[in-house]
Protein backbone atom coordinates (compact mmCIF):
# COMPACT_ATOMS: atom_id res chain seq x y z
CA UNK A 1 0.00 0.00 0.00
CA UNK A 2 2.84 2.37 0.81
CA UNK A 3 4.13 1.97 -2.76
CA UNK A 4 0.71 2.96 -4.13
CA UNK A 5 0.53 5.97 -1.85
CA UNK A 6 4.04 6.99 -2.88
CA UNK A 7 3.16 6.55 -6.56
CA UNK A 8 -0.06 8.56 -6.19
CA UNK A 9 1.68 11.30 -4.24
CA UNK A 10 4.44 11.50 -6.86
CA UNK A 11 1.97 11.81 -9.74
CA UNK A 12 -0.22 14.23 -7.78
CA UNK A 13 2.80 16.42 -7.17
CA UNK A 14 3.74 16.30 -10.88
CA UNK A 15 0.18 17.14 -11.91
CA UNK A 16 0.11 20.01 -9.40
CA UNK A 17 3.37 21.44 -10.75
CA UNK A 18 2.21 20.98 -14.34
CA UNK A 19 -1.04 22.87 -13.65
CA UNK A 20 0.86 25.58 -11.77
CA UNK A 21 3.35 25.97 -14.65
CA UNK A 22 0.48 26.18 -17.16
CA UNK A 23 -1.55 28.76 -15.19
CA UNK A 24 1.41 30.97 -14.30
CA UNK A 25 2.95 30.58 -17.78
CA UNK A 26 -0.34 31.47 -19.49
CA UNK A 27 -0.64 34.58 -17.33
CA UNK A 28 2.94 35.64 -18.11
CA UNK A 29 2.43 34.97 -21.84
CA UNK A 30 -0.57 37.30 -21.86
CA UNK A 31 1.34 39.98 -19.92
CA UNK A 32 4.37 39.79 -22.23
CA UNK A 33 2.14 39.99 -25.32
CA UNK A 34 0.36 43.03 -23.88
CA UNK A 35 3.68 44.76 -23.16
CA UNK A 36 4.89 44.13 -26.71
CA UNK A 37 1.61 45.44 -28.14
CA UNK A 38 1.80 48.61 -26.04
CA UNK A 39 5.35 49.21 -27.31
CA UNK A 40 4.19 48.76 -30.91
CA UNK A 41 1.28 51.16 -30.39
CA UNK A 42 3.68 53.85 -29.20
CA UNK A 43 5.45 53.67 -32.56
CA UNK A 44 3.48 55.89 -34.92
CA UNK A 45 2.30 54.65 -38.29
CA UNK A 46 2.03 50.93 -37.50
CA UNK A 47 -1.18 49.47 -38.86
CA UNK A 48 -3.67 48.18 -36.24
CA UNK A 49 -4.06 44.96 -38.22
CA UNK A 50 -0.33 44.31 -37.90
CA UNK A 51 -0.41 45.07 -34.16
CA UNK A 52 -3.29 42.63 -33.61
CA UNK A 53 -1.48 39.97 -35.62
CA UNK A 54 1.68 40.34 -33.53
CA UNK A 55 -0.42 40.24 -30.37
CA UNK A 56 -1.83 36.85 -31.31
CA UNK A 57 1.47 35.55 -32.69
CA UNK A 58 3.49 36.41 -29.58
CA UNK A 59 0.84 35.06 -27.23
CA UNK A 60 0.38 31.71 -28.97
CA UNK A 61 4.11 31.11 -29.44
CA UNK A 62 4.64 31.69 -25.72
CA UNK A 63 1.63 29.51 -24.94
CA UNK A 64 3.13 26.61 -26.92
CA UNK A 65 6.32 26.96 -24.85
CA UNK A 66 4.23 26.97 -21.65
CA UNK A 67 2.36 23.80 -22.69
CA UNK A 68 5.64 22.03 -23.46
CA UNK A 69 7.03 23.09 -20.07
CA UNK A 70 3.88 21.77 -18.35
CA UNK A 71 4.18 18.45 -20.18
CA UNK A 72 7.81 18.20 -19.03
CA UNK A 73 6.54 18.37 -15.43
CA UNK A 74 4.40 15.30 -16.16
CA UNK A 75 7.43 13.44 -17.40
CA UNK A 76 6.30 13.48 -21.02
CA UNK A 77 9.09 13.44 -23.60
CA UNK A 78 8.45 16.65 -25.55
CA UNK A 79 11.08 15.91 -28.19
CA UNK A 80 8.51 14.13 -30.34
CA UNK A 81 6.11 17.05 -29.96
CA UNK A 82 8.80 19.48 -31.14
CA UNK A 83 9.47 17.27 -34.15
CA UNK A 84 5.77 17.21 -35.02
CA UNK A 85 5.50 20.99 -34.62
CA UNK A 86 8.58 21.49 -36.78
CA UNK A 87 7.26 19.21 -39.52
CA UNK A 88 3.85 20.89 -39.43
CA UNK A 89 5.49 24.32 -39.60
CA UNK A 90 7.55 23.27 -42.61
CA UNK A 91 4.48 21.89 -44.41
CA UNK A 92 2.45 25.02 -43.68
CA UNK A 93 5.33 27.23 -44.78
CA UNK A 94 5.65 25.44 -48.12
CA UNK A 95 1.88 25.52 -48.69
CA UNK A 96 1.62 29.21 -47.86
CA UNK A 97 4.91 30.31 -49.42
CA UNK A 98 3.40 33.11 -51.51
CA UNK A 99 1.16 34.32 -48.68
CA UNK A 100 4.06 34.38 -46.23
CA UNK A 101 6.14 36.28 -48.78
CA UNK A 102 3.36 38.87 -49.11
CA UNK A 103 3.05 39.06 -45.33
CA UNK A 104 6.80 39.60 -44.86
CA UNK A 105 6.70 42.30 -47.53
CA UNK A 106 3.73 43.92 -45.78
CA UNK A 107 5.71 44.06 -42.54
CA UNK A 108 8.61 45.70 -44.40
CA UNK A 109 6.28 48.30 -45.92
CA UNK A 110 4.84 49.14 -42.51
CA UNK A 111 8.20 49.42 -40.74
CA UNK A 112 10.36 51.04 -43.43
CA UNK A 113 7.55 53.29 -44.78
CA UNK A 114 8.61 53.89 -48.40
CA UNK A 115 5.15 55.46 -48.72
CA UNK A 116 2.08 56.19 -46.62
CA UNK A 117 -1.65 56.34 -47.24
CA UNK A 118 -2.45 59.24 -49.55
CA UNK A 119 0.89 59.20 -51.42
CA UNK A 120 0.98 58.93 -55.20
CA UNK A 121 3.20 55.95 -55.95
CA UNK A 122 4.49 54.05 -58.95
CA UNK A 123 5.21 50.43 -58.04
CA UNK A 124 4.77 47.01 -59.65
CA UNK A 125 3.78 48.73 -62.89
CA UNK A 126 0.87 50.58 -61.21
CA UNK A 127 0.61 54.32 -60.66
CA UNK A 128 -2.00 55.61 -58.24
CA UNK A 129 -2.87 56.90 -54.78
CA UNK A 130 -2.28 54.58 -51.83
CA UNK A 131 -5.63 54.10 -50.09
CA UNK A 132 -4.94 51.07 -47.86
CA UNK A 133 -1.88 49.09 -46.74
CA UNK A 134 -2.87 45.57 -45.70
CA UNK A 135 -0.75 42.67 -44.45
CA UNK A 136 -0.87 40.81 -47.76
CA UNK A 137 -1.64 43.48 -50.36
CA UNK A 138 -1.76 47.23 -50.93
CA UNK A 139 -4.73 49.07 -52.38
CA UNK A 140 -4.13 51.59 -55.17
CA UNK A 141 -6.66 54.04 -56.63
CA UNK A 142 -5.67 55.01 -60.16
CA UNK A 143 -6.19 58.52 -61.63
CA UNK A 144 -9.27 57.23 -63.50
CA UNK A 145 -10.67 55.92 -60.17
CA UNK A 146 -9.97 52.21 -60.53
CA UNK A 147 -9.27 50.16 -57.41
CA UNK A 148 -6.28 47.84 -57.79
CA UNK A 149 -5.00 45.40 -55.15
CA UNK A 150 -1.29 44.69 -55.59
CA UNK A 151 0.48 41.84 -53.70
CA UNK A 152 3.02 43.31 -51.29
CA UNK A 153 5.79 41.04 -52.57
CA UNK A 154 5.35 42.50 -56.07
CA UNK A 155 5.86 45.98 -54.62
CA UNK A 156 8.98 45.29 -52.57
CA UNK A 157 10.64 43.19 -55.28
CA UNK A 158 10.98 46.18 -57.63
CA UNK A 159 11.63 49.90 -57.66
CA UNK A 160 9.20 52.13 -55.75
CA UNK A 161 8.70 55.72 -56.91
CA UNK A 162 7.00 57.94 -54.36
CA UNK A 163 5.90 60.77 -56.62
CA UNK A 164 4.78 63.25 -53.96
CA UNK A 165 7.20 62.34 -51.16
CA UNK A 166 8.70 65.86 -51.27
CA UNK A 167 7.02 69.24 -51.02
CA UNK A 168 8.44 70.48 -54.33
CA UNK A 169 8.88 69.04 -57.83
CA UNK A 170 10.61 70.30 -60.95
CA UNK A 171 8.65 70.83 -64.14
CA UNK A 172 10.72 69.90 -67.23
CA UNK A 173 9.68 71.00 -70.71
CA UNK A 174 11.39 70.45 -74.04
CA UNK A 175 10.55 73.20 -76.53
CA UNK A 176 11.79 73.23 -80.12
CA UNK A 177 11.99 76.21 -82.50
CA UNK A 178 12.93 76.43 -86.17
CA UNK A 179 16.48 77.04 -87.31
CA UNK A 180 15.37 80.29 -88.94
CA UNK A 181 13.87 81.68 -85.72
CA UNK A 182 15.58 84.10 -83.34
CA UNK A 183 17.12 82.06 -80.50
CA UNK A 184 17.57 85.03 -78.14
CA UNK A 185 13.99 86.18 -78.67
CA UNK A 186 12.66 82.67 -78.02
CA UNK A 187 14.76 82.38 -74.86
CA UNK A 188 13.47 85.71 -73.51
CA UNK A 189 9.88 84.70 -74.26
CA UNK A 190 10.28 81.39 -72.45
CA UNK A 191 11.65 83.17 -69.38
CA UNK A 192 8.71 85.60 -69.45
CA UNK A 193 6.16 82.77 -69.77
CA UNK A 194 7.59 80.86 -66.83
CA UNK A 195 7.92 83.91 -64.57
CA UNK A 196 4.37 85.02 -65.39
CA UNK A 197 2.94 81.93 -63.66
CA UNK A 198 2.50 82.78 -59.98
CA UNK A 199 2.71 79.12 -58.97
CA UNK A 200 6.33 78.85 -60.13
CA UNK A 201 8.82 79.08 -57.24
CA UNK A 202 11.11 81.66 -58.81
CA UNK A 203 13.39 81.78 -55.75
CA UNK A 204 14.41 78.17 -56.45
CA UNK A 205 15.73 79.11 -59.87
CA UNK A 206 14.56 78.86 -63.47
CA UNK A 207 16.53 77.25 -66.28
CA UNK A 208 16.00 78.13 -69.95
CA UNK A 209 18.83 76.94 -72.17
CA UNK A 210 19.57 75.49 -75.60
CA UNK A 211 20.03 71.78 -75.06
CA UNK A 212 20.30 70.34 -78.57
CA UNK A 213 20.67 71.20 -82.24
CA UNK A 214 18.34 68.50 -83.46
CA UNK A 215 17.59 67.35 -87.01
CA UNK A 216 14.59 69.63 -87.45
CA UNK A 217 14.70 72.05 -84.53
CA UNK A 218 16.74 73.96 -81.99
CA UNK A 219 15.62 72.51 -78.66
CA UNK A 220 15.34 74.39 -75.37
CA UNK A 221 15.06 72.85 -71.92
CA UNK A 222 12.76 74.75 -69.58
CA UNK A 223 12.98 73.85 -65.90
CA UNK A 224 11.04 75.39 -63.02
CA UNK A 225 10.25 74.35 -59.45
CA UNK A 226 6.68 74.22 -58.16
CA UNK A 227 4.82 72.86 -55.16
CA UNK A 228 4.06 69.18 -55.67
CA UNK A 229 0.25 69.56 -55.78
CA UNK A 230 0.65 72.19 -58.56
CA UNK A 231 2.92 70.05 -60.77
CA UNK A 232 0.50 68.90 -63.46
CA UNK A 233 -1.53 72.12 -63.59
CA UNK A 234 1.62 74.18 -64.09
CA UNK A 235 3.06 71.80 -66.68
CA UNK A 236 -0.15 71.85 -68.73
CA UNK A 237 -0.47 75.64 -68.42
CA UNK A 238 3.14 76.33 -69.45
CA UNK A 239 2.86 74.02 -72.45
CA UNK A 240 -0.28 75.80 -73.65
CA UNK A 241 1.11 79.27 -73.00
CA UNK A 242 4.31 78.54 -74.92
CA UNK A 243 2.32 77.57 -77.99
CA UNK A 244 0.00 80.60 -77.78
CA UNK A 245 2.82 83.08 -77.17
CA UNK A 246 5.05 81.68 -79.91
CA UNK A 247 2.16 81.91 -82.36
CA UNK A 248 1.67 85.58 -81.42
CA UNK A 249 5.38 86.35 -81.83
CA UNK A 250 5.77 84.42 -85.06
CA UNK A 251 8.14 81.79 -83.69
CA UNK A 252 7.62 78.38 -85.25
CA UNK A 253 7.51 75.04 -83.44
CA UNK A 254 8.64 72.70 -86.23
CA UNK A 255 7.59 69.13 -86.73
CA UNK A 256 10.06 66.47 -87.95
CA UNK A 257 10.96 67.12 -91.56
CA UNK A 258 13.55 66.19 -94.15
CA UNK A 259 15.03 68.55 -96.73
CA UNK A 260 15.56 66.94 -100.15
CA UNK A 261 17.94 68.71 -102.54
CA UNK A 262 17.68 67.91 -106.26
CA UNK A 263 20.62 68.60 -108.58
CA UNK A 264 20.27 68.70 -112.35
CA UNK A 265 22.91 66.68 -114.13
CA UNK A 266 24.15 68.02 -117.48
Image: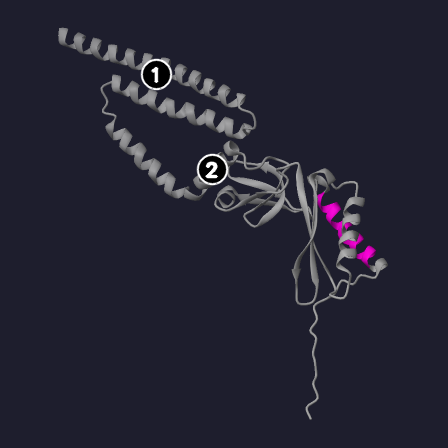
**SS at badge 1:** helix
Q: Which residue does the numbered mark 1 point to in the structure image?
A: 22
Whether residue 112 can be seen here = yes
What percent of the width, then of the height, locates residue 69? 29, 19
The answer to which of 51 and 130 lies nearer the viewer is: 130
The answer to which of 182 and 221 lies nearer the viewer is: 182
On residue 103, the disc is: 2
Which circle's residue, 1 or 2, is located before the other in the chain? 1
Whether residue 1 can be seen here = no
Q: What's the residue at 78%, 52% (across, down)?
A: 188
Q: What's the residue at 71%, 40% (across, down)?
A: 229
On residue 253, the disc is: none
- Residue that sits furthest to the top in the current view: 2
What percent of the width, then of the height, locates residue 113? 54, 34
Residue 237 falls inside the magenta stretch: yes
Q: What's the residue at 75%, 42% (across, down)?
A: 200
Residue 68 falls inside the magenta stretch: no
What percent of the width, then of the height, locates residue 38? 50, 19
Considering the image in quadrants, where does the C terminus appear?
Answer: bottom right
What percent of the width, then of the height, locates residue 128? 63, 44
In the image, residue 135 above or below residue 150: above
Q: Which residues are magenta?
A: 231-246
**SS at badge 2:** helix
Cα–Cα gap, marks 1 and 2: 31 Å
Amino acid sequence: MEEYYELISTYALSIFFAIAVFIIGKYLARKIANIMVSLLKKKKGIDDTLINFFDGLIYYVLLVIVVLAALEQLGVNTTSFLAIIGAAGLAIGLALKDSLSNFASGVMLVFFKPFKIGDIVNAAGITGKITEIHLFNTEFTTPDNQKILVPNSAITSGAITNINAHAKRRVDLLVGIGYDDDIKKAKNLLNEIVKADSRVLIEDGITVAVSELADSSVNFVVRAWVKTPDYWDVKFALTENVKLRFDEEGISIPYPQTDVHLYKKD
